[in-house]
Image: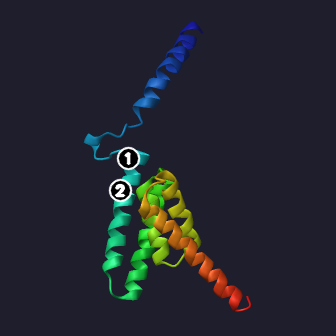
Amino acid sequence: MIKHGMLVLALLMAYPALASAQVPVPTEGMGSYYHTPEQRAMEAYARGVKLKRKAEGETDPEKQAKLYLKAKEELSKPVGYQGNYDGYLALGQVYMALEQKESAFDACSHASAMKPNDETAKNCAEQAKNAIQQAAAAKKGDGG
């Protein structure tokens, strides 16, 4: 009985070491690399800005709209990971290009709040605000 108890005790003591030995720890040398939220944000921001620039240079309106939509998706990611001025400003500009005025105002306002003295962010928010007011006035003038 004592031998049986000692065997059980030995197995219980060895179990944590055996269990952890079965789970590989990802390392850079193994081919996988853990990305921090900051790294993911930077990568998504870079993809989004690249798509935004490509859309700005596109002459075909249909292709341009698709590129802006892809840029919006990519630029929304870094803002979700870690909000920053550049991400919010680029996202606001993309929303303006897509004529999503309320979303543009929100994003540009976030950018402006992060850098209150920055004229680019102020102009972006002001442009979006004016577009919202014009749309509301046009709707009101149409009897809606």
Compared to 43, does 48 lie above or below? below
Residue displayed at 34% across by 77% down? 56
Is any part of residue 83 visible from this angle?
no
Instruction: Please state the horizontal and vertical placement of residue 33, each as a whole percent of the image.
Output: 33, 45
Q: Nearer the viewer, residue 5 or 20?
A: 20
Instruction: Please state the horizontal and vertical placement of residue 35, each as a whole percent of the image.
Output: 38, 46
Residue displayed at 69% across by 92% down? 142
Q: Is residue 115 left or right of residue 49?
A: right
Q: Which residue is mark 1?
A: 35
Q: As drawn, which residue projects farthest toward the top?
A: 2
Compared to 20, does 131 lie above or below? below
Picture quarter with the C terminus: bottom right
Q: Nearer the viewer, residue 98 or 142?
A: 142
Label 1 Cα neighbours within 10 Å, binned few <14 / some 14-19 / many ≥20: few
Query: Which image quadrant is residue 132 in?
Result: bottom right
Identified by mark 2, the residue type is Glu
Earlier sequence position, callout 1 versus callout 2:
1
Task: Report the disc number at residue 136.
Answer: none
Tag 1 and tag 2, C-beta contact below 8 Å = yes
Residue displayed at 67% across by 86% down? 139
Instruction: Please state the horizontal and vertical placement of residue 101, each as a whole percent of the image.
Output: 56, 74
Q: Which residue is mark 2?
A: 43
Instruction: Please state the horizontal and vertical placement of residue 136, each as a whole percent of the image.
Output: 66, 81
Picture quarter with the N terminus: top right
